[in-house]
Image: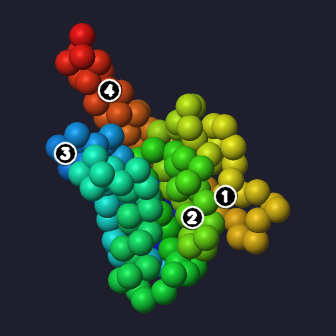
Amino acid sequence: MIGSQDWRRPMELALEQATIAATHQDVPIGAIVLDQRGRAVSSAGNERELAGDPTAHAEVLAIRRAAETIGSCRLDGHTLVVTLEPCTMCAGALVLARIGRLVFGAYDPKAGAIASLWDVVRDPRLNHRVEVVGGILEERCGDLIRDFFATRRDADA
């Protein structure tokens, strides 16, 4: 089990996935699923542009790959580490997969469904709630996304 002070290394791995996503013009978001011992089970970066699939968010892909790896759609006790606060679709996927813990980097004031706009994963009306740790390497995670969009705005100008 990873202690709360040790989330920086897994977030570094998620940032590596985010950087890869940016190379194919996807929004640089990366995710890692860790097992109960803190070992990486799967990883992904956004592949929406690459796959032409609006649901190919890093979180969803990492969850799918983890489920395939462990042979179960239930990821009880697993942790998802992601560079940006998940949207409503990804928050719903966390609940449905029974992820035990979510660790995220930057908050998303425009679409965040964990703390910014909603709190889907801890809604008491649902049959599963996720432990949340936010703000890990927040500045680096946020800078990566801000720089990506600034570059795109400059190119469009």
Outermost residue toward the front?
52
The residue wearing badge 2 is 94
Left or right of 19: which side holds 136? Answer: right
Q: Which kind of residue does numbered mark 4 sit on?
A: Phe
Question: Label for residue 149?
Answer: 4
Mark 2 and mark 1: span between their CA atoms? Answer: 7 Å
What x and y, as percent, mark residue 10? 36, 59
Display coloring: rainbow
Task: Classify mark 3: helix, strand or loop.
Answer: loop
Q: Nearer the viewer, residue 54 or 112?
A: 54
User: Cβ–Cβ below 8 Å for labels 4 and 3?
Assistant: no
Residue found 26% across the figure and 24% down from its top: 152
Task: Check disc 2 and give the amino acid type.
Answer: Leu
Distance, label 4 to label 2, CA atoms, is 27 Å
Q: Quadrant of the C terminus?
A: top left
State if disc 1 and disc 2 touch (CB < 8 Å): yes
Query: Of marks 1 and 4, which one's residue comes earlier in the chain?
Result: 1
Give the mark, 4 or 2, whose residue is nearer the N terminus.
2
Q: Amino acid at mark 3?
A: His
- Where in the figure is residue 13, as x and y percent of width and height? 29, 57
CA–CA distance in space, label 4 to label 3: 14 Å
For label 2, the SS is helix
Q: CA distance from mark 2 to mark 3?
A: 25 Å
Label 2 or label 3, whichever comes before in sequence order = 3
Which element is circle 4 on?
Answer: helix
